[in-house]
Amino acid sequence: MSTTDPQRDDANRVRIFDTTLRDGEQSPGISLNKQEKLEIAHQLARLGVDIIEAGFPITSPGDFESVQAISREVEGPVICGLARTSKQDIEAAWNAVRDSERPRIHTFIATSDIHIERKLQTTREDVKGQVRAAVAQAREYTDDVEFSPEDGSRSDLEYMAEVIQIALDEGASTINVPDTVGYTMPDEYRRMFEELFRLVPDLRAATVSVHCHDDLGMAVANSLAGVQGGCRQVECAVNGIGERAGNASLEEIVMLLHTREPTMGLWTGIDTTEIARTSRLVSRLTGYPVQPNKAIVGRNAFAHEAGIHQDGVLKERATYEIMDATTVGLRSNAIVLGKHSGRHALSKALQEMGFELDGQALNTAFKRFKELADRKKNVTAMDLEALVTDELREDVPGYSLEWFEVDASSLRPPHARVSVTLPDGTSATGSFTGDGPIDATFQAINAATGTAPALSEFTIGAVTEGQDALGEVSVVVELDGVTGAGQGVSTDIIDAAARAYVRALSVALARSQASDAVGLPEPTA
Ligand code: KIV
Ligand code: ZN
């Protein structure tokens, strides 16, 4: 059935509210710049999400500018900015989203006693007053206002119902009740919504939303339970990234609703064939690899190992597959270009894939394509996607790799020399004799940059199949208590690793500078 199928009842449409760029970006080690956030937002629009929560504008000038740029450029979804209940927060959120065709302000305050007493150090009455003022202020700017009672699943239900009634009276049109700490269970969460609908009959005229964290691995199950309890908006993030154990994973909840639509009758407006590409983009730009056995988008999600399974699938795919890989955009790896393809062919192929490159960006992409085509017989859409995304990361301010050389031999320990551009624009070289070629390269980068980070994660993979495939490396480092994640792509695995490492270092540096420079101002409303 298509999204416009007359048999589909709008009352059963579940809105997808994507928070990859806000809650997702709160994952340790992730720091996306404006260009990267824009790239993700454009892809989310292609995916067909209903709402993009583009950021938390008061938190930093960078966040404000990114939300503003997304509001100005990205068409289709509602663009939402997060705000606490303070006047400055709501004003900042509005100024950041006001240029969108469809702006939304999302304001929140905690309603659980532990948060009210310990974190906010205030009273239930004061919280009610803050909600009244915040929603009223947001409504002066826009009709589309969402309110969330933070830590809703651990709040006193009667009290939370009173707060929600206030938000509705002041004109909020979406009420999102989060399981902020990932503590609830499906039955409990569902019953909470059923009870809220009973206590606050006005909720029936609003959009009611779920927002679940994965601390106990229940985020998607809890989100589904909320939907079965009457909610029609799901807040989620691509690859399930987010605070601590992350948010409900967008691809899992969407494919759950899609696959079980015949049973549940619930549907979304998502173009599922864009799921795999969105997942790869988010993974590359955040530097967070996707675990191989991750549902829907993991490398093994559609792989069959046991002989009995392989035999079954060859005879009839449905014996062991509940979804077709092409439905989520996997295995659509058509060859697009060859060794003799020119600049025009590259530009056309990229355009068809949704990348608008010109000038210097196109020149760089062409140079990297030619390097790849010299080594690899057939350049596929996935190769091009990896190269172009990799180039985007060149904009990360901080360190950048100029060149490296490694003497590797089975007779003596490998020796690496590198040259790196430092944040002040000067070049520095470093050398090291290490345990292996990658270790030697990382240590040489440490010597050049004068840093000594701990390597917390290192993963290596291939973009496509075959011996000539592009290699892809993800690295997470910890520098002075701050984490940074980076990813690199190249036909040479040491080059990919070195690129990933300097990016992770740059991200850690940027994050530690940002946390020194801006703390969240205390709410005053
Ligand atoms: O988890 C949470 O409670 C949140 C709110 C801001 C919605 O992210
Ligand atoms: Zn959250």
Image: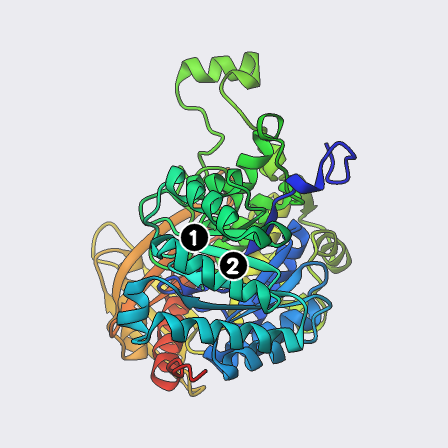
Residue 88 is at least partly visible in this image: yes
Determine which residue is flagged by label 1. Answer: 247
243 displayed left or right of 330: left
Which residue is drawn at the image coordinates 30% and 56% (left, top)?
A: 457
Position of residue 197 measured from the top left corner of the image (x, y, whole percent): 52, 47
**Is residue 406 placed above or below 327 in the rendered structure?**
below
Q: Nearer the viewer, residue 61 or 291?
A: 61
Which residue is drawn at the image coordinates 45% and 45% (left, top)?
A: 195
Q: Quadrant of residue 5?
A: top right
Kindly check if marks 1 and 2 are in contact, taking CB atoms under 8 A apart as contact: yes
Q: Which of 369 and 424 is in front in this view?
A: 424
Determine which residue is flagged by label 2. Answer: 19
Kind of element beneath mark 1: loop
Residue type marked 1: Asn
Ligand 2 within 8 Å of the CB at mark 1: yes
Ligand 2 within 8 Å of the CB at mark 2: yes
Q: Which colour scheme is used?
A: rainbow
Please rate how many residues cluster around mark 2, counting C-alpha atoms within 10 Å: few if below 14, some from 14 to 19, many from 20. many
Quadrant (top left/top right/bottom left/bottom right) for the N terminus: top right
**Is residue 155 placed above or below 214 in the rendered structure?**
below
**Alpha-carbon span between mark 1 and mark 2:** 9 Å
Q: In which quarter of the image is residue 98?
A: bottom right
Q: Nearer the viewer, residue 414 or 310?
A: 310
Residue type marked 2: Thr
Position of residue 108 measured from the top left corner of the image (x, y, whole percent): 47, 67
Q: What's the mark number on residue 11?
A: none
Position of residue 524 measured from the top left corner of the image (x, y, whole percent): 42, 84
Q: In which quarter of the image is residue 112?
A: bottom left
Which residue is drawn at the image coordinates 56% and 44% (left, top)?
A: 276
Q: Earlier along the polypeptide chain: callout 1 or callout 2?
A: 2
